[in-house]
Amino acid sequence: MQPPTPAHSPRAFAGWLALLLILAAGGGLWWIAYSSGASQDHSSVSSRSKSAGPPWLYGRADARFTVVLYADLECPYCRDYLPALTRWIDANPDVNGQWHHLPLPMHNLAAQREARLAECAGEVGGHDAFWSAAAWIYRHTRSSGQGLPADTAYPDLTPALQACLDSDRPDAIIRTQTEAAARDGIVGTPTLRLHDRNSGKTILLHGPVDGDALLSALDLLASPADASEEIDDSRTQADSVSKPK
């Protein structure tokens, strides 16, 4: 992550303003909590390795912060946002990304088929292969539940990948992640969960969030407890914070 931006700079002010607008637009549906209170697995695995997943990681395994992206491969907003998010992660080496499947009912069965394809690409080729498959799907899908054109075939459909598609392994992973999102009250895409490995705190943000607002959210996660309490006092009553017991 880039060094903290001075609080009086225009960039920092813009980031905090954008973050406050995002939180307000979410109707207060966000929280800061210790990771032990969330169902998401925040374990880090290098996206450059060939070790098996999931969760599928993008970026450095030893990054302090993880941005978990809850996404649907038929979601047009996710399609537009993923390239910007990965570029931001590339520019902030103290952050990595993690994929969380959330195919929406309105986009099935296309979203489920595409999630299975990406999951099997990851099983066969590792983390890089998963992210490459997701990017390929977003480039070719018609989105909004229309799926891939009938004459469009995945270029790396190997026998091993086909064997995975013929199994129920990807379905089990997608179902587990979808159920975990439902338990956490996450029903829309894209949604972001930011996690700080040092403090154990997380924050949930709804919608495609720009880079300055993400940096401001990371500053909030990294702030000491007393600073978080000061920020808590300045928020509206609609917001809710869960502090460690």
Image: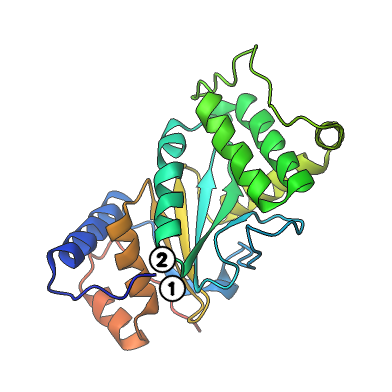
Instruction: Out of 231 and 212, give the one closest to the viewer.
Output: 212
Q: In this view, does 177 lie above or below 39?
A: above
Left or right: where 213 falls relative to 40: left
Q: Name the residue under label 2.
A: 31
Say what secondary structure mark 1 lies in.
loop
Q: Is residue 170 visible?
A: yes
Give percent across and percent down for residue 231: 25, 75
Instruction: Out of 238 and 168, give the one closest to the viewer.
Output: 168
Residue drawn at x 86%, y 32% as measured from the top left: 159
Question: Badge 2: few (under 14), some or many (20 or more) residues near its Cα, within 10 Å?
Answer: some
Q: In this view, does 70 lie above or below 72?
A: below
Check the picture and name the quadrant holding the N terminus: bottom left
Q: Mark 1 points at which residue?
A: 242
Give percent across and percent down for residue 131: 60, 45
**Which quadrant would residue 153 be assigned to in this image?**
top right
Q: In this view, does 215 lie above or below 166?
A: below
Residue drawn at x 73%, y 55% as measured from the top left: 53
State which tag comes first along the sequence, 1 or 2: 2
Give percent across and percent down for residue 149: 59, 15
Q: In this view, does 62 lie above or below 111?
A: below
Say what secondary structure mark 2 lies in.
loop
Residues tagged 1 and 2 counted as in contact (Cβ below 8 A): yes
**Which quadrant would residue 158 be assigned to in this image?**
top right
Instruction: Out of 27 and 90, give the one closest to the viewer.
Output: 90
**How much space separates mark 1 and mark 2, taking CA atoms?**
6 Å
Left or right: where 103 falls relative to 32: right
Labelled disc at residue 23? none
Give percent across and percent down for residue 16: 22, 64
The type of colouring in the image is: rainbow
**Which quadrant would residue 62 be assigned to in this image?**
bottom right
Q: Which amino acid does label 2 sit on?
A: Trp
Q: What residue type is labelled 1?
A: Ser
